[in-house]
Every structure is written in structure tokens, then in C-alpha cells.
Image: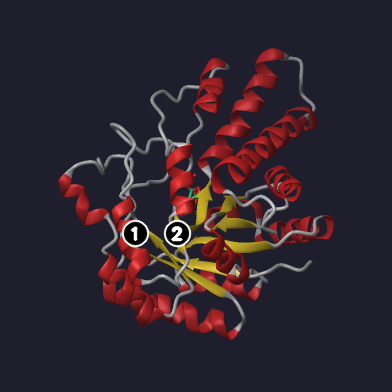
Amino acid sequence: MPLVTTKDMFKKSMEEHFAIGAFNVNNMEIIQGIVDAAAEEHSPVILQVSSSAIKYARIGYLRKMVEAALEEHDIPIALHLDHGPDFETCKLCVDNGFTSVMIDGSKYDFDENVRLTKQVVDYAHAHGVVVEAEIGKLAGVEDDVNVAEGDSMYTDPIQAKEFVEKTGCDSLAIAIGTSHGAYKFKGDPKLRFDILAKVKELIPNTPIVLHGASTVIPELVDMCNKYGGNIPGAKGVPDDMLHQASKSGVSKINVDTDLRLAMTAQIRKVFAEDPSVFDPRKYLGEARAQIKETVQHKIRDVFGSSNKA
Ligand code: G3H
Ligand code: 13P
Ligand code: ZN
């Protein structure tokens, strides 16, 4: 089947209370690991590309590899721009066949975020492409979101409603305590499910997106460290919280860090166990298998999107 937008998969996710995994892709092995897992689970899936992934892999290669995945598998696949920094990057992706783009105006004040998002919505909608926007700021590595001052980082539900009404965006990323990368919490993991509930109450028909939602899978961190890595104290969002989020109105869950860990842990293991290996297919093939297993676990055991294709 051809690439789809996220419209139908999000509608189903809101009706049936599950989330769709949005996985960041940078190369062939990552794409194959993800779509092989989604196909085996008969799950819809979102492949997302950041602007730095475009710089790295080049847009034509990414698009053609995704096209190859579509020829092999009969599941709904959306191709999405992750964290579009400006109008031009969003336009580039719309013009290159992406079915969904994110404009990340969260770094601007409310009015500028509205203006920029609306500009992208007008262009994307005229080309049949859907738009994700963001309101509220995800905490950085250094920010302790568990303290009261951290409240200013969280999405204000009333502002979220006004933002969606003013921009006409199709889905909305909100800040409820997650953050990007491998160091998400200083203390115990904590998400503001009360904010999520309020947002869903005010804008029940807007699909909600959770960024910075990797589990930072402890087994993969341990594997990295065991085979020569040095990433101590990494901590992510536990599976049970992500499961709760997917049952409570989150339609899209973004995962990049866990795929990086899966790939790196497996490659480190191959090299450590057999220093004579130098055929890239040997270590990249095992990395692909580890990515597949990681994605399959999320789809089946955490997000609940198996058999929702
Ligand atoms: O949220 C950001 C994603 O993890 C993409 O990261 O810009 O390094 O590709 P990147
Ligand atoms: P993680 O760093 O938690 O994987 O988040 C990825 C993400 O939000 C991509 O937009
Ligand atoms: Zn993100």
C-alpha cells in the first residue's frame, strides 16, 4: 500500500485507546528493523526523519528506502518530519512526498509559534499532508522536572486548546515531564498524567504526541556498558507509564534513543566477542535484529498497536 498520512491511524488509536510508535530512522538497517517488526505485529507505524537525519542520509535515499519498505509490507506506514525547525524544511519534506511534518515552534513565544505553525499548516494541507505542532517545552538534560519551578515547562491545557483552534494543526505534542535523550529523570520517573487528562478533556479530538518517550531500556544500557561503553546513570520512561499514556489518550509515542542503544549495544557485543570481525554485514545485521526485537516489544507489550493495521 502507498504511504498514508496519520489521519486514519490516529482516529483508530483514539477510538480504541492505543498508541502508534514513531521511530526515528537514519539508515537502511534501522528502517528494516522497524518495518519488519511492525509487519510481524500487523501494526501501523510512523517512520520519522529529523533534519539532521536528512543531512546525514540525504532525503532521496531515505525516501527510496521507505518506498522499498512499502513494496515489501502491507501495513500502514507514514513518513514524518520530526522537529521541523522552520517553514523551508517542512516545505522540502512536503515536496518530497512525506505524508506528515512536524513544525517545532516551541522555542518561540505563543504568538510566533501560532504564526509559524499556521504557515506550515496552510502549505501542508494544500498538499494533502498533515501537521504536528508542539506547545510547552520538554525539559532538558539539566532540568529537574520534578521540582515546582519546573511547572513552567509543562504544557498549559488552556493554551493548548487556543493553539489548536488558531493553527488548525492535526496533532499536538505536549510537555508532561518527558525529555529527549538518555538522561530523563534525576530522581524517580514522574509524568503529569493530570495535564494529559485536562488536555484530552479540552481538545478530545486532537491526537496527542509524546516526545522524549524512550524507556532507555536498562538491559541495553547494561549491554553497552558491559562491552566497553560508558553511559552510567541513564534513565528513561518506564514501560508501565508509557502503557498508561497509550491508554489515556496519547496517540503517537516518539522513540529514538532506544534504537540508538539497541544498535550500539549489539555492535559493541559483536566486536567484543569477536575482534576479528570486519564484515559490516555481520555487525549491522545483528544490530538490525536487535532493533527489530526492541520495536516489536514496544508495539506488542507497551503501545498496544498489534493487529491494528
Ligand atoms: O528528538 C530528536 C530526535 O532524537 C532526533 O535527533 O536530531 O540527532 O537526529 P537528531
Ligand atoms: P527519545 O530521545 O526519548 O528517544 O525521544 C525521541 C523523540 O522525541 C524524537 O522526536
Ligand atoms: Zn522529539
Q: Residue furthest front?
A: 16
Q: Compared to 156, does 307 lie above or below? A: above
In the picture of the structure, the residue carrying the numbered disc 1 is 197
Q: Quick check: 49 above or below 234? A: below
Marking on residue 76: none
**Residue underneath mark 2:** 249
Q: Nearer the viewer, residue 79 or 194?
A: 194
Among all residues in the image, which is located at the extreme right?
72
Mark 1 belongs to which amino acid?
Ala
Residue under the image location 56 percent in, 60 percent down: 16
| Amino acid on which disc 2 is placed | Gly
The quarter holding residue 74 reads: bottom right
The reply to whether dot 1 and dot 2 touch (C-beta < 8 Å) is: yes
**Residue at 21 percent of width and 48 percent of height:** 150
Which residue is more in the foreground, 138 or 284?
138
Q: Quadrant of residue 262?
A: top right
* Residue for point 55% across, 23% down: 224
The local secondary structure at tag 1 comes to helix
Visible residue check, residue 212: no
From the top left corner, tell me how far across and down residue 214 is, in percent. 48, 42
Residue at 26% x, 70% y: name it. Answer: 158
Question: In front here: 22 or 207?
Answer: 207
Q: Residue 266 appears at what percent x and percent y?
A: 65, 27
| Label 2: few (<14), some (14–19) or many (≥20) C-alpha neighbours in 10 Å | many
Residue 120 in view (yes/no) = yes
Left or right: 118 with respect to 229? left
Mark 1 neighbour density, 10 Å: few (under 14) some (14–19) many (20 or more): some
Residue 120 location in percent, x, y? 48, 77
Cβ of mark 1 under 8 Å from ligand 2: the answer is no
Q: Earlier in the sequence, mark 1 or mark 2?
A: 1
